[in-house]
Amino acid sequence: MRSIPSLLRAQRTFLALALAVLPPLLLGWWTWQAIAQKPGGGPYFFTLALLWGMAYILLLRLGLRWGQDEAPWGPVAALFLTGWGMLGMAQVALWAAWRQSLWLLLSALALYGWAVLLQARPSLGRGRTIEVVFWGTLGLLALTLAVGRYPGEAQGARLWLGCCGVYLQPAAWHKTTTILFLAWGLMQGTPPWSWWLGLALTGLFLGWQGDLGNLALFFLVTLSMLAVHPRWRWRALAGAVLLGLGGVWRFHDLPRVQARLLAWWSPQQDPWGAGYQVLQTLQAVARGGWWGVGPGSIQVVHRVPLVYTDAYYALVAEAWGWWGGGLLLAALGGVALWALRVAQRMGFTTAGLAAWGLAGWWMMQTFWVVAGNLRVLPLTGMPIPFTAYGGSELTAAYAGLGVLLWMQGRRSNASPTFWTKTLRRTAWLWGVGMGMLLLAHAWWVLHGA
């Protein structure tokens, strides 16, 4: 007769497998609908589904192996979002969907290989390696100041390194390495000057580039990690003041930032210029209504600049409506809540603080980007995590996902009461933020652009 623990483990395995089957079924049905509406695109859609399926099998196998008694519902939700994003991109920019599928497969292979290497040599996951990787991505970020490029146009912010049609954005990778480096520095008692210097240089380089979206996100994530640590909370207040002063300074210094803020405040003043993207995005949201027009009947999003990356929520809103936006936010919330669950299991340790930082990054970036699409906040130029087009963002997000998978099979007993309360408050805060975004979406459905 089987013991109760073994029966519980078998039940969790069954639930994990049942959960794992749901995304392929949903995406398969949506792919079939897209092919029915665009018969000529059948081979392209099938190939995209095949590449997604290869990455899905690799990461699902890794999640089930390392998850032990915990279902890997976070990675499943992340992979579902990536597949959904690729399907939407194929409707408006097939080249973006192709590139995103290759980036996904590359991310899955790299993550799986790194996992095998960590199992063989656990010392690679220690702090010194994290420090080396952090300074390496910071060096790439500095390199963009000298030889950075802007893909596709002669003028623009030079935030990428690239050649022969392939572009990389070091700022995206630096998010993951900064979170890991700061968690290690705060919890291991390393000399503060080391990570203070790294944070200061990161802020300086991002401000010099004029990448205020990533700069603001960088400050918010690092300030939240400082604020949750009892020893460094007062530094967070000083950092918030610096963030405000730096934002005002760059607002007066960069015409591009001024145009975005003015377009957010009053897009009708320049409907064919700075306000064009905002107005077209809101028209797509209003046209989608509550239930959407279907992925094969989208019209307005074809007029939205960069709809496959900066304004991807507009595509979801027109194709799938208000309920589609809610499903997108719920899936993103599922990834973040899974990261918080990992943080709870690890306790207030280096791993736990890193997991909390990764969850905060995904929640803040999601809220900021979607709020920009709904004119709650100014547009930032960043993609929705795991979903919208951006190879560097996708690889950085999956790198963080791999770190969490590695943590998931481990447990720590160092979990003080304040840490549990912090995680619960963070989860509630995300729920409130998601509700605000859905209310804003409903407002534009009812009142139009």
Image (cartoon, rainbow, N blue to C red):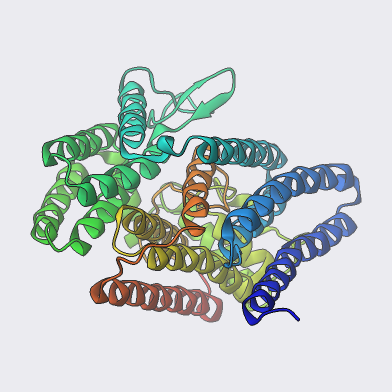
In this rendered view, identify the residue nearer to me: 351 or 173: 351
In this rendered view, identify the residue nearer to me: 28 or 121: 121
In this rendered view, identify the residue nearer to me: 50 or 1: 1
* Residue 228 position within the rendered picture, expressed as x and y whole percent measured from the top left: 22, 64
Image height of 101 relative to 271, above or below:
above
Residue 57 seen in this snapshot: yes
At x 80% / y 65%, what residue is drawn? Answer: 25
Q: Does residue 240 appear left or right of residue 290 in this picture?
A: left
Total labels drawn: 0
At x 48% / y 42%, what residue is drawn? Answer: 396
In this rendered view, identify the residue nearer to me: 263 or 228: 228
Image height of 94 relative to 66, above or below:
above
* Residue 167 position within the rendered picture, expressed as x and y whole percent measured from the top left: 52, 27
Outermost residue toward the front in this view: 1
Residue 263 in which image quadrant: bottom left
* Residue 335 position within the rendered picture, expressed as x and y whole percent measured from the top left: 52, 63
At x 55% / y 52%, what residue is drawn? Answer: 386
Q: Does residue 169 appear left or right of residue 55 in this picture?
A: left
Quadrant for the N terminus, please. bottom right
Q: Does residue 345 appear left or right of residue 289 in this picture?
A: left
* Residue 382 position within the rendered picture, expressed as x and y whole percent measured from the top left: 44, 48
Residue 258 seen in this snapshot: no
